[in-house]
Image (spheres, helix red, strand yellow):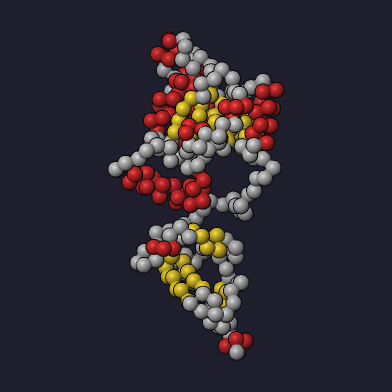
Amino acid sequence: MGAHKTGSLVDNESERIDRQKAAFGHDTIARLKDLNVLIVGCQGVGVETAKNLILSNVGGVVLWDTTICKELHRGSNFYVTPDHVASGDVTLADASLGELRSLNPFCRVDVLASESLSDEAVLSKDVLGSRRPFSAVVVTQLLPKEELFNLNEIARANGIVFVMALNNGVTSSIFSDFGPRHEISDATGEPTQTLAVSNIEILDEKPKLLEVSGAKDGEKVVIVTVAQNDHGLEDGDVVVLEDMREGMEGLNGKCVTVKRVAIASPVSAS
C-alpha cells in the first residue's frame, strides 16, 4: 500500500478499505492500490487531484512542478504559505509535499526532482520503489505543444493513461487518452450497489425441476436470495460476496455471475 504498517495502523487501514469497498467496489479497490500516478502541475487542479488520489489510497503519487511559489499561487494552492513565498526558492511541488504526505501514511508521495520531464522519468519501471511503472499521467498545467504531444504519445505507446485537465479562470478543458486497448466493463455506469443476503443454499446436484441458465442437471449450484425485492440484477451481472459468516467464510471475495433461475412444471420436467 505504499508504506510499512504495524499494530493499530493495520486495523485502521482495514476499516478504511472496508468503507472504500462499499463506495467503489472490490475490483476498483484492488486496482487502486497498485496505481502510480504522475501529476504535472501543482496549482489548483493539480494539488486537488493529488489530494483526492492520496485519500483514495492509490499506491503512489509523484509531483512535478518547478514553478517558484509566488503570492498569487496562494489563491489556488492551499498548501503554499507566506514562508514559501518569502524564501523565493521553494517550488510548488516542494511546498505541497509535506501536507500531501500527511494525508495518508499508506500512500507513497514524492517530488520528481528534474527541471524537465524526461522520457526516462515517465517510463521508469520502479516508481517510488514499488517495482511498478506509472499507470497514469495527469497534466494540470499548459505545456508547450511539442512537449505535450510527446508526453501523450509516450504514454499511449506504453500503456499509460494520459489525462489533461486545465482550469483557466472561468473556463476549463479536459482530455483523456486511455490507449487503444482500453476496455469498459461497466455496462450501465451506475454506482456499485450493496445488497443484503437473506439466504444461501448449496445444491450438490441440480434437480430437474430447477432451471438455471447454463447449468445442467446434476451439476452443483449455489442459490443466493437477497433481501431486496427491487435488486436490479440481470443475467450476466457480476456479484462479489463479502462479510460471509457461519462457516461460509471461504466465499468472501468470490466473484459469481448472476444467472436466471426458474422452477419448471412437473409435467415439462418429467
Q: From this view, report whether residue 73 is shown above or below residue 235.
A: above
User: Percent position (x, y) of residue 140?
Assistant: 58, 27
- Picture residue at 51% right of the left edge, 26% below the top: 63
Instruction: Tell which of 150 and 45 is nearer to you.
Output: 150
Of the pair 21 and 189, the residue shown nearer to us: 21
In the current view of this chain or complex, which residue is farthest to the left?
A: 7
| Residue 127 visible to the viewer | yes
Residue located at (61% from left, 72% from top) = 214
163 vs 206, left or right, is right
Find residue 150 and report its image quarter.
Answer: top right
The quarter of the image holding the N terminus is top left
- Residue 140 in sight in this render: no
Percent x, y of residue 20: 44, 47
Q: Is residue 100 left or right of residue 11?
A: right
Horizontal side, residue 41 vs residue 90: left or right: right
Query: In which quadrant of the rendered image does the C terminus lie?
Result: bottom right
With respect to residue 218, does 138 lie above or below? above
Residue at 46 percent of width and 27 percent of height: 110
Q: Residue 38 occupies which quadrant of the picture?
A: top right
Tell me residue 155's x, y (percent). 64, 34
* Spot occupied by residue 52 in the image (x, y as percentages of width and height): 48, 35
Q: Residue at horizontal 65%, vertical 28%?
A: 151
| Left or right, 78 with reference to 8 | right
